[in-house]
């Protein structure tokens, strides 16, 4: 008979990685339960929060086991979520043993993200598109594209300093605003506000906010509240970064470049 603790450890580990990479709470809960049930472990309870997993199985037998995991919030990785969902389906269909699944789970953890050049180009195009979408001119879009590319390079090197998410968002928004004002001060006829709006879009917490709404709709009020607070704090940090630079510029030059 398959050891309950081994199955529970694998299920919780898979749920842990799913949650770290941005999966919804209900998806993590369903995945853990599906793996346990596929091994006939029906006497089980799973409770998932946006940053924690609590699970127990076979509490009334000699195989009783329980696990608690703290899961800090990490940047999301859709590729890992897709790979883990596929692995979960294989385990539930019994096409792979738990021992072999551990090996594939390690492979899922090591799945690389997009390389830096692709990220730079994608971020630049996104920033330029949003600047134009929010009422900027074609020149605003081009400048926002450049700002976006430089932002991605800045974030790449800044991530090596192991700063907190709060510091990263404040520094990133300061960097964008300074660049937008410098381009405006150089004599280009651009709308610095449109460039700033386009430039900050990679920092905007769209996914935490969306997941928060989905958690509220699924009656996971605690997880929804945590993600909502995370989204609001991120938005506040962005506003602080932009506000600091604009305030300094207004104090120094009377807002001549805004």
Image (spheres, rainbow, N blue to C red):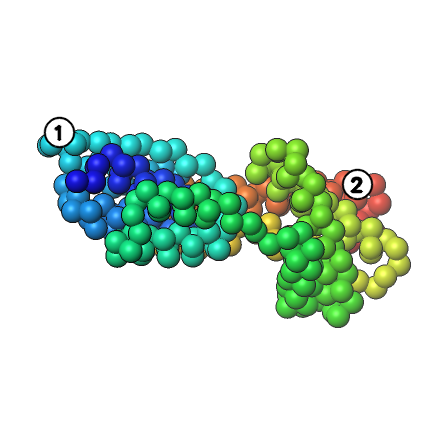
Nearer to the camera, 166 or 236: 166
Side of 57 relative to 208 (left or right): left
Residue 28 location (% of width, % of height): 33, 48
Q: Give the number of the mark in front: 1 or 2.
A: 1
Q: In which quarter of the image is the N terminus?
A: top left
Q: Residue furthest left?
A: 60
Side of 42 relative to 12 (left or right): left
The residue that disc 2 covers is 251
Splitting the image into 4 quarters, where does residue 251 fall?
top right
Side of 135 relative to 57 (left or right): right
- Residue 206 visible in this rendered orientation of the protein: yes
On screen, residue 208 above or below 73 = below
Nearer to the camera, 49 or 233: 49
The residue that disc 1 covers is 62
Q: In which quarter of the image is the C terminus?
A: bottom right
Residue in the image at 14% along x and 41% along y: 43
Residue 181 location (% of width, % of height): 79, 51
Residue 72 location (% of width, % of height): 45, 36
Q: Which residue lies furthest to the bottom in this view?
A: 138
Residue in the image at 76% along x and 64% along y: 142
On screen, residue 108 above or below 4 = below
Q: How far apart are marks 1 and 2 (CA)?
A: 71 Å
**Mark 2 crowd level (few <14, some 14–19, many ≥20, 10 Å Cα):** few
Residue in the image at 47% along x and 40% along y: 73
Nearer to the camera, 59 or 170: 59
């Amino acid at each position: 008979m398959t050891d309950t603790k081994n199955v529970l450890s694998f299920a919780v580990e898979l749920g842990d990685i799913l949650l770290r990479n941005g999966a919804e709470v209900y998806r993590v809960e369903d995945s853990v339960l599906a793996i346990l049930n596929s091994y006939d472990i029906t006497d089980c309870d799973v409770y998932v929060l946006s940053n924690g997993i609590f699970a127990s199985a076979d509490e009334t037998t000699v195989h009783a086991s329980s696990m608690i995991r703290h899961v800090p919030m990490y940047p999301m990785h859709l590729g890992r979520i897709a790979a883990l969902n596929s692995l979960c389906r294989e385990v539930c269909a019994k096409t792979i043993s738990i021992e072999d699944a551990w090996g594939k789970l390690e492979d899922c953890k090591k799945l690389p993200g997009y390389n830096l050049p692709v990220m730079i180009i994608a971020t630049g195009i996104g920033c330029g598109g949003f600047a134009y979408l929010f009422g900027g001119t074609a020149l605003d879009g081009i400048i926002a594209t450049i700002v976006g590319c430089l932002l991605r390079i800045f974030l790449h090197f800044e991530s090596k300093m192991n700063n907190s998410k709060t510091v990263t968002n404040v520094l990133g928004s300061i960097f964008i605003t300074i660049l937008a004002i410098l381009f405006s001060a150089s004599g280009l006829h651009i709308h610095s506000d449109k460039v700033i709006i386009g430039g900050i879009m990679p920092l905007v917490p769209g996914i935490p906010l969306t997941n928060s709404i989905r958690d509220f709709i699924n009656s996971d009020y605690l997880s929804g509240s945590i993600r909502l607070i995370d989204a609001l704090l991120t938005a506040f940090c962005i506003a602080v970064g932009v506000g600091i630079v604009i305030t300094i510029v207004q104090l120094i030059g009377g807002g001549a470049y805004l």
